[in-house]
Image (tube, grey):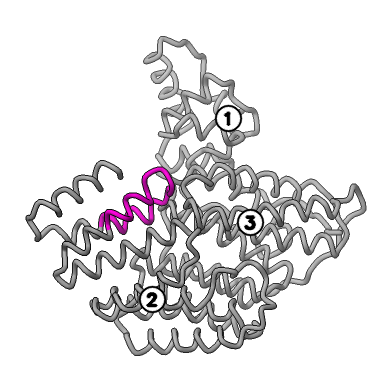
Amino acid sequence: MFMSSSMERFAHPLTVARQARNWSQQVLAHKLRQQARKHSVNIATSKNTVYKWERGQCPDRITRRLLAELFGIPWSLVEDCAWPMWLPTGGLPGTSQPQTQDGAVDATSEVSEKAPVDRRNFAALTGTALTTPVLAWMYNPEPFQAALDGRQVSLDVVEAIEDRTDYLRHLDDKAGGGELLGMVAGDLRACAHLLRNSHYSEGMGKRLFSVAAELCRTAGWLYFDNGRHAAAQACYFAALRLAHVTADRAHGAIILAYLTLQATWLGNTRDALELSQAAQNSSQHIALGKDAALAAMSAGYAHAHAGDGMASSRAFTQADRLLERDDDGQLARTYWMDEGELTRGMGQCLLMRGQAQQAKDHLERGISLLDPTYTRDRAEYLTLLATAHAQQQEPEQACQIGSTVLGLLNGQVNSPRTNDHIHALNHELEPYDVPYVREFTEQARQLL
């Protein structure tokens, strides 16, 4: 069982939100009264009322709606989150807690409530703000702790969360992350509630914290696939804390690899290189296999984006060697890591480096090795293949392949990240003013 301790105290989110706008309590009260008059509503909000809210009192439903309008928060998100977790504090959720068991629980709870609200209020981290939590993961290990007596979490509950997390991972391969965000947000809140309020044996607790880390990492990927990068980082850092508590350095290396891939996608070259180095350093704790191959492959992406083709090729060669020596004993978390994934990844990196012909060869072979049920991945890599054709001045082939992708996306896949690839393809086709290109680009615009 895990031992709980008193929660670290933070400024109330309403205090942080108004101070970020340089509003006093009196100014906020005045703005709320103005907002209410727009709706022909009379409220008696005063400085003293705001003071009470910032000391824990919850505003009524009408006032919460007015606050949401004032801070630019969609009401649908307010209804999904408890007061005051939906308020725009401006800081990335789940990154300020200590590297302890209690810190991991607090971070998971904060991420489960705040990650869905990130679309307009949080900015993804870069530079030292991004790498500091990574260094904390690598160099400040904490012991796995004991717990208080109390009501036990049963094995059935933990196994149900494990099965559910595995189900979400496989469903993402087919449908993309867009359809799953609501599901994973609910699962995160339920898991955070278990971590905070339940009691369990030491062995069961370690398993519960482990699957919570898996769920946070899965949520991070889904947010990343949807372009919600701050929410993705928040989930990844919560996953790091949870893996830290269970001393699962192998999982930590995988999470660092995901952070590397995200930084590469965002174009943050220096961050990607530093994160990839951290992932590879941490992967020294991994037995040979898919997990270690993922860490090496993420380095390949980072080096490709940095323009270092030789380093990128070396990283992919290392990943291939690690994959060849896999003993099929890896956990389900990297089930998708195989020869086809490496081949497609190398194709994408070659395309990044402007080597379209070699990219085509790798992408075609990699797509032929792809599980036919992985619809989202098929759409993504076919779009990259079409882009390679466009760069090789083969617009007709590009549009033919692109039309296949639009068929996959129409009602089958919801993945804004894949949509971004389509937009990039349209950009590559802009120089070709011919009917079939105009027809394809118009179909793409209508669909997206």
Badge 3 or badge 1: first in the primary sequence: 1
Q: Which residues are magenta?
A: 402-423
Judging depth in this view, the residue of 228 and 88 nearest the camera is 228
Tell which residue pokes out farthest to the left in this image.
433
Dot 3 crowding, Cα within 10 Å, few <14, some 14–19, many 20+ = many
Dot 2 crowding, Cα within 10 Å, few <14, some 14–19, many 20+ = some
Residue type at mark 3: give it.
Answer: Leu
> Label 2, label 3: how many angstroms apart (C-alpha)?
32 Å
Q: Residue at x 46, y 68 (%)?
A: 370
Secondary structure of the residue carrying numbered label 2: helix
Q: Are marks 3 and 1 in contact (CB under 8 Å)?
A: no
Query: Please, what is the dominant secondary structure of the magenta stretch?
Result: helix
Mark sitting on residue 330 = none
Please tell me in which quadrant of the rendered image residue 378 appears: bottom left
Q: Is residue 146 above or below residue 319?
A: above
Residue 73 % position (x, y): 44, 34
Residue 331 % position (x, y): 67, 71
Residue topped by disc 1? 51
Residue type at mark 2: give it.
Answer: Arg
Residue topped by disc 3? 215
Relative to 381, 430 lies left or right: left
Whether 82 is among the magenta residues is no
Disc 2 versus disc 1: nearer the observer: 2
Residue 33 % position (x, y): 43, 18
